[in-house]
Image (spheres, grey):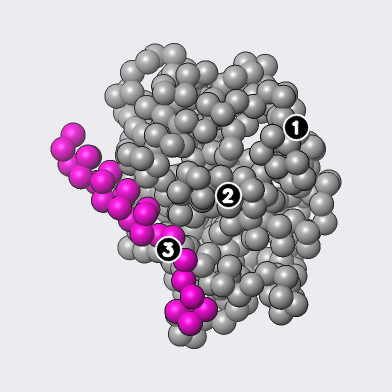
């Protein structure tokens, strides 16, 4: 236990060091604007294996992508053939991806447990349980045991980021994307934080980073942001921020993932992922979180159906997002990284995105990747 506490405190210190903004003059030599933007992109792709002719390998090798996200199911094709088939196959895939990268590649997966687990028992991976089931047991040590098993599996497979734990407070048990899928530990913010800290600590012990999601809270929604516009104005509660505050004040967070929810009480114009009021003023300002912010999938309906790609990229970067995710699962766009880089580069050249914003994200991501060494 003492060793775990020492590791937690070390990671908390590093989390605070991640994000002191840099000046334009403090850039790493040899890193051009397009390469820095590439580090901000995390992209999904199709294939159980890759080779030098794969577009994703080319994008990684040329610095257009700083991370990838893996799935076991291809939604756009309604197919179970995507990236994950067996432990042996997955380990080979992640090795091929890392080999293509000149610097550590972020390889992420959603392995929350229960219904949201990309590494499934039927494919030869260890069984999992949902966060809701663990919350009902009211035993944080048990949560730590399950989380340790998950983290060990991910590390062995070459996956260095688990997009978990979910720290949404389950205020609406009929919520189609949180409550019904048993993704939340509890309706009690204190219990959510207690269990989430065990998940974070267990993953760090195995060298796997985590992401708290979905800020500023998705647990009260009655709609699914995968499908379209989701308004939580009249259902959201300030106590949905409590787990974040507790975690920031104790173990710290490697990353925080945004929600695509709209909440006019926090921002009357933009959903959280695109909101400088929510990500800048609230998360980075009032809550003093200076670490990496990662977006939810930008191809989800709540963003893609409501905003142009240019608007979404401009707004999320100005709001404070560091890693921008394109899952390439709900829709498939092999050229999305090049397209995004071109748009963002143009926005910088036009002065609509200041260069220091790219520089700051680049430094935060570099510090995050240093944790993996």
Residue 90 coordinates in the image, percent (x, y)? 49, 50
Q: Earlier in the sequence, mark 1 or mark 3?
A: 3
User: Disc 2 to disc 1, how far (Cα)?
Assistant: 20 Å
Toward the viewer: 314 or 67? Answer: 314
Q: Which residue is mark 1?
A: 231
**Of the two numbered discs 3 and 2 in the rendering, the one whose residue sits closer to the viewer:** 2
User: Disc 3 to disc 2, how far (Cα)?
Assistant: 16 Å
Q: Earlier in the sequence, mark 3 or mark 2?
A: 3
Residue 309 coordinates in the image, percent (x, y)? 78, 59
Q: Which residue is mark 3?
A: 20
- Residue furthest to the bottom in view is 30
Q: Is residue 123 magenta?
A: no
Toward the viewer: 69 or 365? Answer: 365
- Which type of secondary structure does the marked residue at label 2 adopt? helix
Q: Is residue 173 above or below residue 230?
A: above
User: In the drawing, does residue 196 fall left or right of residue 201?
Assistant: right
Toward the viewer: 13 or 86? Answer: 13
The C terminus - image quarter: bottom left
Toward the viewer: 100 or 175? Answer: 175
Q: Residue drawn 37% across and 44% down?
A: 252
Q: Earlier in the sequence, mark 2 or mark 1?
A: 1
Magenta segment: 1-27
Q: Which residue is mark 2?
A: 281
């Amino acid at each position: 236990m003492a060793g775990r506490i020492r590791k937690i405190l070390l990671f908390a210190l590093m989390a605070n060091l991640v994000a002191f903004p840099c000046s334009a003059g403090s850039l790493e030599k040899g890193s051009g604007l397009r390469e820095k933007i590439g580090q901000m992109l995390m992209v999904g792709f199709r294939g159980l294996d890759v080779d030098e002719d794969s577009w994703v390998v080319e994008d990684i090798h040329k610095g257009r992508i700083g991370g990838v996200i893996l799935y076991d199911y291809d939604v756009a094709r309604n197919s179970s053939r995507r990236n994950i088939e067996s432990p042996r196959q997955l380990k080979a895939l992640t090795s091929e991806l890392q080999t293509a990268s000149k610097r550590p590649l972020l390889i992420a997966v959603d392995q929350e447990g229960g219904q949201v687990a990309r590494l499934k028992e039927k494919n030869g991976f260890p069984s999992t349980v949902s966060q809701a089931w663990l919350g009902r047991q009211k035993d944080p040590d048990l949560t730590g045991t399950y989380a340790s098993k998950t983290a060990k599996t991910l590390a062995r497979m070459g996956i260095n980021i688990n997009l978990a734990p979910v720290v949404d407070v389950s205020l609406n048990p009929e919520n189609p994307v949180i409550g019904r899928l048993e993704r939340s530990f509890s309706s009690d913010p204190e219990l959510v934080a207690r269990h989430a800290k065990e998940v974070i600590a267990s993953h760090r012990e195995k060298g796997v980073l985590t992401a708290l999601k979905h800020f500023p809270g998705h647990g009260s929604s009655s709609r699914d942001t995968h499908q379209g516009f989701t308004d939580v104005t009249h259902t959201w509660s300030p106590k949905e921020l409590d787990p974040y505050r507790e975690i920031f004040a104790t173990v710290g967070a490697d990353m925080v993932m945004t929600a695509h929810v709209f909440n006019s009480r926090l921002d009357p114009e933009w959903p959280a992922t695109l909101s400088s009021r929510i990500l800048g003023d609230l998360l980075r300002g009032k809550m003093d979180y200076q670490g990496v912010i990662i977006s939810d999938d930008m191809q989800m309906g709540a963003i893609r159906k409501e905003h142009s790609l240019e608007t979404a990229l401009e707004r999320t970067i100005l709001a404070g997002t560091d890693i921008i995710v394109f899952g390439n699962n709900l829709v498939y766009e092999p050229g999305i990284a090049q397209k995004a880089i071109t748009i963002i580069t143009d926005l910088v050249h036009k002065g609509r995105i200041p260069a220091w914003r790219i520089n700051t994200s680049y430094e935060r991501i570099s510090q995050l990747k240093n944790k993996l060494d």
